[in-house]
Amino acid sequence: MARPASAMRGDILRSALRLFASNGFSGTSLHAIAADAGCSKASLIYHFSTKEAILTELLTPAGEELAALAARLDALPGEERVTATVTGFVDLALRYRREVKILFEDTPTMICNPALGDIPALGQRLVAAMSGGSQEPGRVVGAHMVLGAVFVTCAGEVDVPDGVLREELIAGALRTLGHPAG
């Protein structure tokens, strides 16, 4: 019995995400994705014309949520904004761990993917929010450190339960930014 188109599409996306995260985007072929998803390459191409189309579909939710986080932060006052930014960024990085790993593997190419929006501008908005809007070098550098550390940690294989990892990432980020965790 043939799978419904939506089920096959979901299987293809799950397979692609797993393979991209373990083998890298460039190290994964359409044939490998099709084999892992249990469909023919022709079926895969019916749903997604290119590997880039699959990647765009995988990255779009993360890009949309990152933009939404940046927009929500604009309305918050300074110190509340710092904590909300750290917590929101950690939650996003954990929720999209495999996508972060894909981005980390080939950062220069991946940050240009249109599904992610304007990553450099969103990154600057997050830095501004984490630094509380301060231009003091220590606060700006700390905010950059937090962005990078959360990104690298979530892209790696950290052998800590997700709930503990989340709490430690938030607490460590807030300490780095000179804020009490909590």
Image: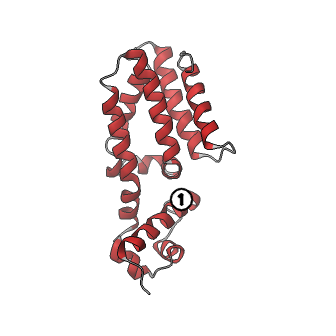
Q: Nearer the viewer, residue 131 or 2?
A: 2
Q: Quadrant of the C terminus?
A: top right
Residue at (52% x, 22% y) in the render: 142
Q: Position of residue 24 (x, y in %)?
A: 53, 59
Q: Is residue 110 above or below residue 134?
A: below
Coloring scheme used: secondary structure
Q: Position of residue 179 (x, y in %)?
A: 53, 16
- SS of the residue under disc 1: loop
Q: Residue furthest top?
A: 136
Amino acid type of the residue that numbered disc 1 sits on in the rendered structure: Gly
Residue at (59% x, 32% y) in the render: 167
Residue labelled with disc 1: 24
Q: Position of residue 145 (x, y in %)?
A: 53, 27
- Asked if residue 173 lies left or right of residue 6, the reply is right
Residue at (48% x, 76% y) in the render: 34
Q: Is residue 61 above or below residue 4?
A: above
Q: Quadrant of the N terminus?
A: bottom left
Q: Is residue 101 above or below residue 126?
A: below
